Image: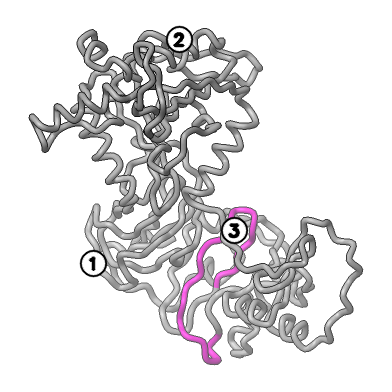
Amino acid sequence: MSSEMQVFRLPDLGEGLTEAELVNWLVAVGDEIKIDQPIAEVETAKSMVEVPSPYAGTVAELHGQAGETLDVGKPLISIARAGAAPVSPEAPAAAEDPVSTGVPASPEVSAAAETYRTEEKAGSGNVLIGYGTPGGATGGRTRPRKASAAVVDAAPAVVPEVPREPAVAGTRIPGKLSAVISPLVRKMARDHGVSLDSIEGSGASGLIMRKDVEAAISAPAEPAEPASAPASASTAEGGLDTRTGLAVSARTPVRGVRKAVAANMARSRSEIPEATVWVDVDATALLEMRAELKKRSPHDTPGLLAFIARFVTAGLKKYPDLNTRFETAADGSQEIVGFEGINLGFAAQTDRGLVVPSVRNAHQMSARELDAEIRRLTAVAREGKATPTELGSGTFTLNNYGVFGVDGSAAIINYPEVAMLGVGRIIDKPWVVNGELAVRKVTELTLAFDHRVCDGETAAGFLRYVADCIENPGGALADM
């Protein structure tokens, strides 16, 4: 690639993420940008982040469209260095060869490339991949495909093409072309309901051309096959589902936070032999204590969740087995990993789905400090601005599902943690106090735990400790 052109690849945005969804471009082709200027908003499996540019110069190419999922390590943006001379439309020989890989091409590949150049010069419209031909298409740009696909790049008719960086071109398979086609031809196939998988390309090495799609469109429809498809198979949106006979109303891609939650929950269920214990707790004294504090200091009284969080961190110090991680090495050996501190995660519902930000070093905080950090993390999580570290560093999770009006839950442990404490709604219930029946404020605590790291005695001991703190909060806080 030209030394005047800099290609910025999508970086690993934290915690070993492998992909991100491009939400919005913050720059356009031709813009002058500075180092560290935000260029795009992307949504990872954990958060929404702005990606800054490590280069200054003129935006030459955007390698993606809003809504597209990009792999980490793939080109995100091409930037011409500040003050660089415009790239000549006459591309060097290496760039003219649309299948150049840095190794000698086979006769088959060379023939395919020559076919492409011939059609492009003729303006036939039989584009393989690129943005039209001199016959009437406007200038556009391609986006690199995954490393397993061979890409053929065309110089656009209006905007001069920048030669591909060798590292990008080198991802192609030498001596082979994949049946990839231009966005225009893909759109044509999609608009007419033609499956590209069913088309055999007429170009060299099986390349699919526009005329192949046109032929498939004009071909008579094949008779429907007998209903021998699997019962779970279903058609596209608007068609009939073969198993239920009902019309399919919508298809929603699973990606971003929802994809991460699905993978995490499935792994938790498949790997962790969890058990659950629960107990009803009289929270009347805690509510009365908080009400009294609120009279004295209306503006900075901690919420109930902050008090419970304080009790949880104290409980985890007494029962550290629940603040661990169970690891299996490649050789099959297993370890229980303990931690010096506590990063307390809490479940937060957002427009993007359920996320679990964590209060780092929660064991060092008072109830008031916990309250402030919980509120801060909830706000940034709902704005989609929480960092991967804030969303992926917990050692134990507190889940207040009582805000949704339910009493209990058979929770799924937030993998790779080993336990989760759930808090149900607080409601009036009949309760025996000093031998007399009374109406008290009662909640249910539920603890799901990994039975590999501890037995029921430990889990019950922790749960009873937190319950006792809620029932006698003044004494508990005095001892902490």
Q: Tell me the CA gap for discs 2 and 1.
A: 69 Å
Reading the chain from its start, which is encountered first: label 2 or label 1?
1
Reading the chain from its start, which is encountered first: label 1 or label 3?
1
**Relative height, residue 455 to residue 104 (above, below):** above
What is the x, y in percent for residue 35?
23, 54
Q: Which residue is mark 1?
A: 83
Q: Are marks 2 and 1 in contact (CB under 8 Å)?
A: no
**Relative height, residue 463 to residue 424 (above, below):** above
What is the x, y in percent for residue 407?
46, 34
Q: Tell me the CA gap for discs 2 and 3.
A: 64 Å
Query: Which secondary structure class fits the magenta region best?
Result: loop
Disc 1 crowd rating (10 Å Cα; few below 14, some 14-19, many 20+) is few
Residue plotted at (47% across, 20% down): 279
Which mark, by number, is residue 101?
A: 3
Q: Which residue is mark 2?
A: 461
Q: Amino acid at mark 2?
A: Gly
Q: Amino acid at mark 1?
A: Gly
